[in-house]
Amino acid sequence: MRSLRNSLRLRTLLIVGGTAVLTAALFIMITLSITQRQMEQQARASLDELIDAMSSMASIACFAQDVTLANETAQSFLKSSAVARVSISAGNSVLALATRPDAQISAADIQRSITRQVSSPFNEGEEVGQVRLTPNWPEINRRIERMVRYGAGMMVALACCLVGAVALSIGVLVIQPVKNISDQLHALDAAEGGMLGQPLHHEDNELGRLVLDINALLGRFRSALQLKHEMHLAQVLHERTRLSAAVFEHSQEGIIITDADNRIVTVNEAFSQITGYSTDEAVGQSPNFIASGRHDKDFYAQMWASILGTGHWKGELWNRDKQGEIRPYWYSISVVRDNGGAIANYVAIFSDITEHRLALQRIEFLAHHDTLTNLPNRVLTLDRFQHASATARRDGTGVALLYIDLDNFKYVNDSFGHKAGDQLLKIAAERLKQQVRETDTVSRQGGDEFLVILPNVADEAVVLRIAAGILEALARSFEIEGHALGISASIGITLFPQHGKDFDTLLKNADAAMYAAKAAGKNTCRQFTEDMNVDALDKLKLKALLGTAIENDEFRLVFQPQINIETKAIVGAEALIRWRHPEQGEISPARFIPLAEESGLIVPIGRWVIEEACRQGKQWFDAGLGPFVVAVNVSAQQFNNGDILGLVEEILYGTGFPAHYLELEFTESGLLNDICHSISTIEQLKSLGVKLAIDDFGTGYSSLSYLKQFKVEKLKIDQSFVRDIGVNAESLEIIRAIIQLGKTLRLEVIAEGVETENQLQTLRALDCNEAQGYLISKPLPAADWMAFYQSWMARHGMPSGSVAPSPQQPV
């Protein structure tokens, strides 16, 4: 549609046609107006002629006063359809009046009537009457309209023919040639030398001269364009030449250009910097003057076959520089041919890739080694095991796999930081390498775990001897940041092919043996047996059962009394969890608590314990028992990773148990894992009124500076020290030191695991505040607690509804 609106032909035809139509319409209107007037005049003339023709009869009738003749004459007038009414009168009397029956005569028609005086038939000078004729104007007008329409139709047809002829003439003679010129201009490619053709029959008129002028203009444009293109091409070639020279001179890569005979034509500055040879020293020589001699003839034959066959070659070449140093270079060699296709030059671009090779070697090393200790990682360890096992199959020997885990390494990290832990791991790695042979492999699996592969094992005694050496080496103290740190190791041993024919099986079995060594007291080694696999499967099964224990209501709490040593009053009850499975029966906490910590189930289990202990305590208090402290152990995982503050606040609110009778026990390692977090959490728990105690005090890396900041109320002496009272003097001194520390910091001290009267009396003599253990009572179910409590308090002369205050109650 848009193209039609922009068409020259269409617009010209519309303008010409419109002008012609308007002119013809104006001409027709004027002509029809004149024609109508002429026809009206002709009608009047016809009526006058009719009157003249009938005047003789009217004259006789008027002269004779003959009414009959007058009527006949009047009827004769009406025979003409142009007459509507006629009257013939003589003097003042009307002789005849005739009107056409279908005539419609208006007052205006009567006023336009034609009146003619009638003369005497004998004397023309004597008027004897008159004839009054009213024309039938509607009929006359219809006749005129028919004639005008006919004339108009003829004139319109004539005008249309005329306009069409004019438009056709203009289209053929003017517009079409102009359009042809326009189409040629659009299709013309001036750059290729195209010209407009002369329009047919217009060679000598204005259109022909216009085409000649356009062709002349195209010629001038083409010359200017060609000149500009040549100038731009010259500029581009100059710029390319300049850039090529700049690239050649300033490129960081060496460039050698030789002739067709492979003689050096020129080299760039980078060549001289890389090889040490100047341009003068290189020009005219063959490039092999810097060859290192490390490549044989076959290598060069293949290289030249590629250069001559494909026109290029890429690869690594070792060359010798002017100082005699042989280094690797990456070369790209290309062939340059002349216009005839013959070889004109060879261009070689090269760069020193020594650092790149070193980086690749470093990446290769990092991909197969531990970044901290530089020991092989699991990938490289697996590869070396594959080689060792293949050799063992061939030679009929064996391979030993030692799985080493550092004991108590977590305490080093928690107490002295990860930097100290990393230093310890590095020293441990060096000590491990000193205990094995050159052919053996020491690797780090991650964390504090190491693997040792001993190939070509013919005697198991050798393996045990190496394991013993490793245990001894790792048991020696580590001097780190001015501290003498002591750790040990647990080692699991498997043998190929007795304990497994593939790496994963041997590793799994060695892991099981390592855990068996830890279970045996650590700082020892164990060789894998099938029973260990059974233990591992039992462990997996137990972990699965543990996941549904809370839902199935299989847990219960027992409570062990805590007494004031001086007054014998019961001052607290420690809540301890027990698990009775419907099929497995009673399952020891020593079995399922470590599994709960490994799997993360310790968090929901810990929640259940706190909530159940508070609920039971509230039930006792409501029954009139006590009041006394209810103590609950909180795992390090729950303290550090769970929302212990929100949990305790929610449980206290839900159960209604008084906050100042709830005592939460934490281990030293749990508190020292994140000091800032621990201090903040303890302060918020204390703001609730909850009491806090440190469990198993003395077994970890006790930090006295942080102990004061923790602001706990109680220290709990580990039962391992209490058990050695009367047996080990060192344990007694440790207990004495802990009690003295409690007095200094104004903390209560409780000893657990009291089983003999001698132990209790010794603790009393040392001024220990509280005690718990089987001497007082074993842990009791909630249903038996009330009877025991009442019986104990009554036996010692105290009411069951009150608690005697501790003599060491902190202010």
Image (cartoon, rainbow, N blue to C red):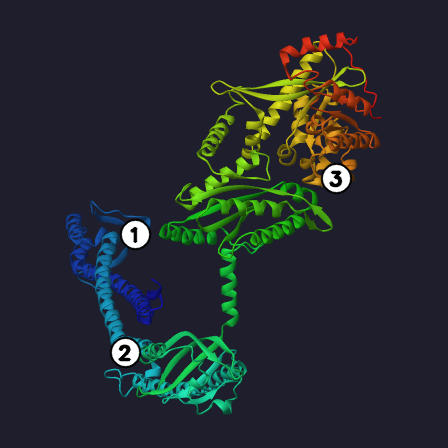
Q: Position of residue 528 (x, y in %)?
A: 47, 38
Q: Nearer the viewer, residue 123 or 500?
A: 500
Please give the residue where the numbered disc 3 appears in the rendered image. 703
Q: Quadrant of the N terminus?
A: bottom left
- Name the front one of labels 1 and 2: 2
Please give the residue where the numbered disc 1 appears in the rendered image. 109
Please give the residue where the numbered disc 2 appears in the rendered image. 177
Q: Amino acid at mark 2?
A: Pro
Q: Amino acid at mark 3?
A: Ser
Q: Which mark is residue 79?
A: none
Q: Is residue 734 left or right of residue 203?
A: right
Using the rendered view, name the quadrant where residue 127 is placed. Answer: bottom left
Q: Nearer the viewer, residue 643 or 101?
A: 643
Q: Quadrant of the C terminus?
A: top right
**Above or below, comparing residue 351 to residue 53 in the picture:** below
Q: CA distance from mark 1 to mark 3?
A: 141 Å
